Image: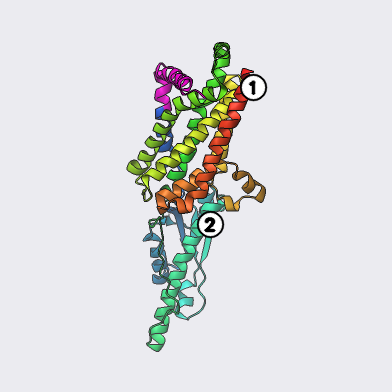
Amino acid sequence: MSLRRTLAVARKEGLHILRDPRSLGLALAVPLLMLLMFGYALTLDVDQVPTLVYDLDRSVESRALVALFEGSRYFRVLGAAPDYSTIQRAIDRDRCLVAIVIPRDYSANLRQDHLAEVQVLLDGSDSNTASIALAYTDARLRGHSAALRARALDRKGGTELKIPVEPRLRVWYNSELKSRNYIVPGLIAVILQIIAALLTSLTIAREWESGTMEQILSTPLRPAELVLGKLLAFFSLGLTDAIIAILTGVLVFGVPLRGDHLLLLATSCIFTFGALGWGVLVSAVARSQLLAFQMGMLSSFLPALLLSGFIFAIENMPHIVQAVTYLTPSRYFVTSLKGIFLKGVGLEVLGVELLFLAAFAVLVFVIATRRVGRRLA
């Protein structure tokens, strides 16, 4: 392999990039715009749950129960419902997610130490949100029940109720439980996978459509030199996108970066090189720029979004799909980014992920080189 010929190809591609300022601007601006749009729009936090209250008891005890939900940041009490039909209409029109129904004998049962029941109605069309809202509601009701039981025993026996187990919770790595801290690192991996693949998916196909591939055939340029030269030209652009995305996540969204900065940069370089190599491979397979663009989008966007663990937990997927995720490089990059950003771990934990990313980059480069060699032959 000749370094001189490789650099000549890289210089040619670099000049082609600089002579098209609109494409260059889009290549630098699209990752930033996508990160800002998805970062602000995509959230898994469930708070300010719209809630209606149907209070049939209208007593001091029932108002104390309603005050529990009014004083919680997880609920937003819309008001009092006069009947069940009002609740049903509000749920049908997506104006209400939770409804608290307090029966007429609620306060009487409390005063007589009988079981006081409270009905909770939820809109289960969105099962994930409904499950979280149900957990919030159950926690508030259980806490209120424990407080009422303690006061009742105190009135009767004059002794304080001792809780046999006192849980002391401590949340590691994301103490505020902000979904943004979890989403943004994974979003960086998805965006880089898409952008890097699209940057190079048109390179070889453009040579065939423009007719310049015949000129390349007449030169002593080797396939490995051609592929590596094109990768080097776009590598600096892809790495710039990675740095922009990382800085946006830290400075704009406030995601904590607890790990080693050099390890983060090295991981991004390996992943970017592999993603760019995948784009060259796609471009070598498809001689048409339209077909190469479609193949690059489908082979980068869908796996990165669905199979990387970015949003959907891999552990909950069918076993066959879990096996397929091991072939997705964005899975290892998402794990590495979350480990470096949130946990501050190093090679002792992420060594396997980096090894898989490096193996993918080498494998894709070798396959792309052979594919281009067949085309040149």
Q: Nearer the viewer, residue 1 or 365?
A: 1
Q: Look at the magenta stretch and give its main secondary structure.
A: helix
Note whether residue 48 is visible: no
Residue located 47% across and 35% down the image: 272
Work out whether 295 lies above or below 375. below
- The verdict on residue 23 being magenta is yes
Residue 162, position in %: x, y? 41, 81
Q: Among all residues in the image, which is located at the extreme front?
A: 2
- The verdict on residue 28 being magenta is no
Q: Mark 1: which secondary structure?
A: helix
Q: Among all residues in the image, which is located at the extreme left?
A: 251
Residue located 46% across and 61% down the image: 136
Pointer 1: what residue? 374
Q: Amino acid at mark 2?
A: Ser
Q: Quadrant of residue 73?
A: bottom left
* Side of 93 where 173 appears, left or right: left
Pointer 2: what residue? 131
Q: How many marks?
A: 2
Q: CA distance from mark 1 to mark 2?
A: 55 Å
Q: Earlier in the sequence, mark 1 or mark 2?
A: 2
Note whether residue 138 is visible: yes
Q: Callout 2: few (<14), some (14-19), or many (20+) C-alpha neighbours within 10 Å?
A: some
Q: Among all residues in the image, which is located at the extreme right?
A: 320
Q: Quadrant of residue 169?
A: bottom left
Q: Amino acid at mark 1?
A: Arg
Q: Mark 2: which secondary structure?
A: helix
Span shown in magenta: 1-27
The quadrant the C terminus occupies is top right
Mark on residue 268? none
Q: Nearer the viewer, mark 1 or mark 2?
A: 1
Q: Nearer the viewer, residue 48 or 345?
A: 345
